[in-house]
Amino acid sequence: MAVVKLTTENFEQEVLKAEQPVLVDFYADWCGPCQMMGPVVEEVAGEVSNAKVCKINIDEQMTIAQKYGVMTIPTFAVFKNGELTKKEIGALPKAVLKGMLD
């Protein structure tokens, strides 16, 4: 499944109302570790069938980043049934990202 780009307009539908777990990558274009994680996030999206993988640019969608307490990027968050259930900060191995969805 392709990575879904999130905005304030589609966040509720794509994340909070999703029927499956959602991994959200909070990133910025200028962030080196975020750029490094981009291909890893794409790989995870291609390998998981039981979850949705999304990205949200914190510079463009500041209100959502603030709402979920994102102070450092990259931040990876998992939402299940509309609730934030897990949050990890920093560049992570692919296995850890996939493990967050379990």
Image (cartoon, grey):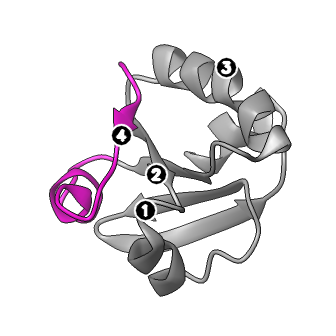
Q: How crowded is mark 1: few (under 14 residues within 10 Å), some or many (20 or more)?
A: many
Answer yes or no: do the residues labelled 4 and 2 have beta carbons within 8 Å? yes
Tell me residue 29's x, y (percent): 63, 42
Q: Residues within 10 Å of mark 2 (few under 14, many from 20)?
A: many
Look at the numbered disc 2 and give the secondary structure of its residue: strand
The residue identified by callout 2 is 56
Specify which label sits upstream in the sequence, 4 or 1.
4
The disc labelled 4 sits on which kind of residue?
Lys
Specify which label sits upstream in the sequence, 4 or 3.
4
Specify which label sits upstream in the sequence, 4 or 2.
4
Look at the numbered disc 1 and give the secondary structure of its residue: strand
Q: How crowded is mark 3: few (under 14 residues within 10 Å), some or many (20 or more)?
A: few
Point out the stretch of residues depicted in magenta.
Answer: 1-20
The disc labelled 2 sits on which kind of residue?
Ile
The residue identified by callout 4 is 5
Specify which label sits upstream in the sequence, 2 or 3.
3
Please indicate whether residue 2 sits to the left or right of residue 97 in the image.
Answer: left
The disc labelled 3 sits on which kind of residue?
Pro
Q: Residue at x 53, y 62 (%)?
A: 58
Q: Is residue 19 magenta?
A: yes
Tell me residue 98's x, y (percent): 64, 35
The residue identified by callout 3 is 39
The residue identified by callout 1 is 79
Q: Residue at x 61, y 66 (%)?
A: 86
Q: Which numbered circle lies on residue 88?
A: none
Q: How far apart are marks 4 and 1 (CA)?
A: 15 Å
